[in-house]
Amino acid sequence: MQLKQLDAFLRVAELKSFTRAAQQLFMSQPAISFQIKSLEEELGASLFRRRDKKVLLTEAGEMLYPEARQMVKHFQRVKVALDELRGLKTGKLTVGGSTVPGEYILPAMLGLFKTSYPGIAVSLKIGDSRQVAARVREWEFDLGVTGAPVAVDGLTCTRWLGDRLIVVSASPAGETDLAGLAAGPLVLREAGSGTRQVLEERLAEAGYPLEECAQTVEMGSTRAVISAVEAGLGLGVVSVWAAAEPLALGRLGEVKVAGLNLDRHFYLVRREAGPGSFALDAFHDFLLTRLTDDAQ
């Protein structure tokens, strides 16, 4: 049963004329007759009878008429809803961000996006990079933004915004070398965070595996790392996005480490296949227009 058949049936039933129905639908009368005949063959029942030059419904037609009206109305409601989704007048978007992009970057990005598309309901959830990737894969998040690339089956990972990790202390700005950094104590993010992953990789490349560093203290968020460093627990490694305010206020000092490059990027993570959404595609493209290869 096709929508064209139901539409033709309803017009003929309401106008009691094949000719007038054809005119309203901008179709030929033979085309209208073909739609009705096809519907009757599919249902195995005659739907119309002629009487006094009028076309009237049969008993089967009377039974079909209210159901056909409901089906056509339902389709029209669905079509309007889809047009609104397609036009981004409505929709839902759930974004997962690892700590730094989730707390320092995405709120502003989502605010700008909502300015352009106020009808879209947005939600932002925070976790470490590993958790964000897992929840994108499990359909809990539409899009993830992580502090390190992820290699998970079923996900695509696109390099996005530049970032730079810095070493900070409770003392004024200073300098050290890799040996001095490894001597600790170090205040670090937990395993699974993008910040931790990048630091481990770069220290290992420089010949100072993290597990061989003297003392480490783990914290569950970037804010906790900064607070611990301010309290004098050791040197911390955080994103320049997160450290900007405490550095400007003099609560932290940046420690330059000779021979250690901590430039990195944030990454956009989404599913390779499966149904997406118009809101997801629009926000993904919106973020890519702000893509930069420059670390902050």
Image (cartoon, rainbow, N blue to C red):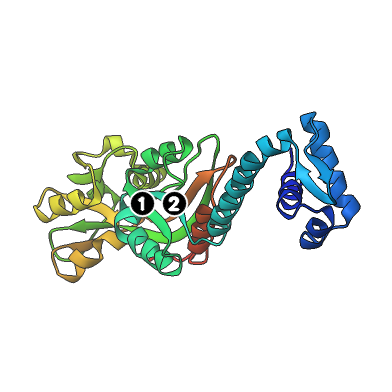
Image position, residue 116 (x, y; %): 45, 69
Q: Amino acid at mark 2?
A: Lys
Residue annotated with mark 2 = 92
**Quarter of the picture holding the C terminus:** bottom left
Specify the quadrant of the image occupied by residue 114. bottom left
**Disc 1 or disc 2, which is closer to the eye?**
2
| Distance from Cα at disc 1 to Cα at disc 2 | 8 Å
Residue annotated with mark 1 = 123
Q: Amino acid at mark 1?
A: Ser
Residue furthest toward the front?
A: 52
Q: Secondary structure at mark 2?
A: strand
Q: Nearer the viewer, residue 258 or 81?
A: 81
Residue furthest toward the right?
A: 30
Q: Nearer the viewer, residue 122 or 263?
A: 122
Residue 256 visible: no
Image position, residue 119 (x, y; %): 43, 61
Q: Is residue 291 above or below residue 55?
A: below
Q: Secondary structure at mark 1?
A: strand
Q: Which mark is residue 35?
A: none
Q: Is residue 22 left or right of residue 281?
A: right
Image position, residue 3 (x, y; %): 71, 46
Q: Is residue 133 above or below residue 24?
A: above
